Image (cartoon, rainbow, N blue to C red):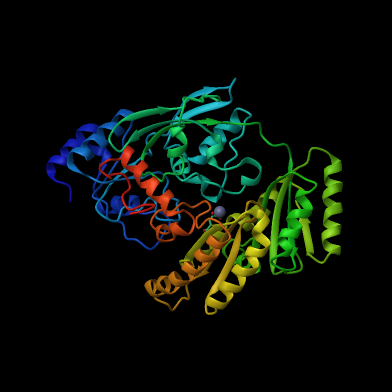
Amino acid sequence: MLSKHIVERLKSIVGISRLLLSKSDLDRFGVDRTTIWQPRPCAVILPGSVEEVRQIVLVANEFNLAIVPSGGRTGLSGGAVAANGELVVAMDRLNQVLDFKPLERTVTLGAGMITVDLQTFAEQHNLFFPVDFAAAGSSQIGGNVATNAGGIKVIAYGMTRNWVLGLKVVTGSGELLDLNRGLVKNNTGYDLRHLFIGSEGTLGLICEVTIQLTRPPTESRVMVLGVSHFSAILKVLEAFSAQIDLSAFEFFSQLALEKVVAHTGCAEPLDTAAPFYALLEFEIANQDLLDQAMGIFEHIVEQGWVLDGVMSQSLSQAQSLWKLREQISEALRQWQPYKNDISVRVSSMADFIKEADQLVADRYADFELVWYGHIGDGNLHLNILKPEAMDSQDFVASCVPVSSEIGGLVARYQGSVSAEHGVGLLKKDYLHYSRSAAEIDMMRRIKKAFDPKGLLNPGKIFD
Ligand code: 2HG
Ligand code: ZN
């Protein structure tokens, strides 16, 4: 509970109606898309300017009040969970375009802008913001930057980090930093901007972001291929990427397809069911490329790697095929899945998959396992579904030991225990599988420099 005095101080910064204290607001703003933690913030505050954010952080310092920064709360690792009486600082009102420079193709915006609104803004100016994922309709740019969001176009365009040219942040001690200011070239010592990207709100509150936009892609085609076995997916990737620049290469299992078809009512993509499906996308600059793609298709069918396939003939068909992949996470939600978001180098994937598949098939013999992900960039999502009759806590408890074994395997391949979802609360016990003790110690010291009192998102990434 906040004292009356602190409530008055906070209200005097943002106005009475922008400090939310009702149970429904606390419940709504205190969680992300994880289902493990119960929301218990002390209040939610909605600043309307960078200066207001700074004032809030100064008050937090005065009263040792912990802060959880909040974007669209679409995260899957508990990074935006406020379960210990923290003050949630929600960026929703900082959602305007502040500056647009067509010559540079850059746009500066408030951190609370919804991802899809930035995509639409870019389109309206005949430009393109290439970071895209299923939660784009509610995630906010500041959250994307704080988690270095990835998504479905990473093989062609990289992660959010690639598109950030400037950041205005308020540190844990209330300093305002204006980092890189939209410059393309700026070799003046440490680039602090990159520390904030992916820092999950533990170093500062991201208030404004300058984004590089790019040219829109030309017409694209989407193919969905029924693949005969797990490791053949990588042979298919190799066959295509040797000849064609792909803008996406995703995969999902038959079980994922069944769940998504049941959830969305979408049609099955192929007449013949297959154990796995690859979804790939490429731009068609000319007819030769289509012929090339057909040639590759014939080859991979002859090799026995692919059983059947379909290529989109219209934008709406392409969108329907994409839906089969993009809606998987949502379709699985009712089973409260235990999530893995792991990656290894693409060149190690074939061996890694063999071992990972064997490990989880043995150790999770009683659970439904759903494999999918962005296999083209080395990122696998493995969702373990909770049996209906099983208690949620028992389910998580039975997944934890296997997660450590998966962590050990990932470590052996020098991979990542969180490829794109961040560490938050969910993955912090596994951080040591991907980062050395020296690195974690260095991260702690960096946090101390920006947030000496440890008020920003305490307990996230590490304790
Ligand atoms: C996706 O790729 C998202 O669909 C969510 O990153 C993955 O829910 C998941 O495990
Ligand atoms: Zn993903």
Q: Residue at x 66, y 31 (%)?
A: 215
Q: Is 12 located above or below residue 3 in the figure?
A: above
Q: Name the foreground residue: 293 vs 444.
A: 444
Q: Residue at x 20, y 33 (%)?
A: 12
- Relative horizontal placement of residue 317, taking residue 148 as reference (left or right): right
Q: Position of residue 219 (x, y in %)?
A: 74, 39
Q: Position of residue 443 (x, y in %)?
A: 39, 46
- Find ligand 2 in the image and state its quadrant: bottom right
- Relative horizontal placement of residue 345, taking residue 3 as reference (left or right): right
Q: Residue at x 37, y 29 (%)?
A: 177
The quarter holding residue 260 reads: bottom right
How many marks are shown on the rendered structure?
0
- Relative horizontal placement of residue 351, taking residue 95 as reference (left or right): right
Q: Name the foreground residue: 243 vs 93.
A: 243
Which residue extends farthest top? 103
Q: Quadrant of the C terminus?
A: bottom left
Q: Position of residue 63 (x, y in %)?
A: 17, 41
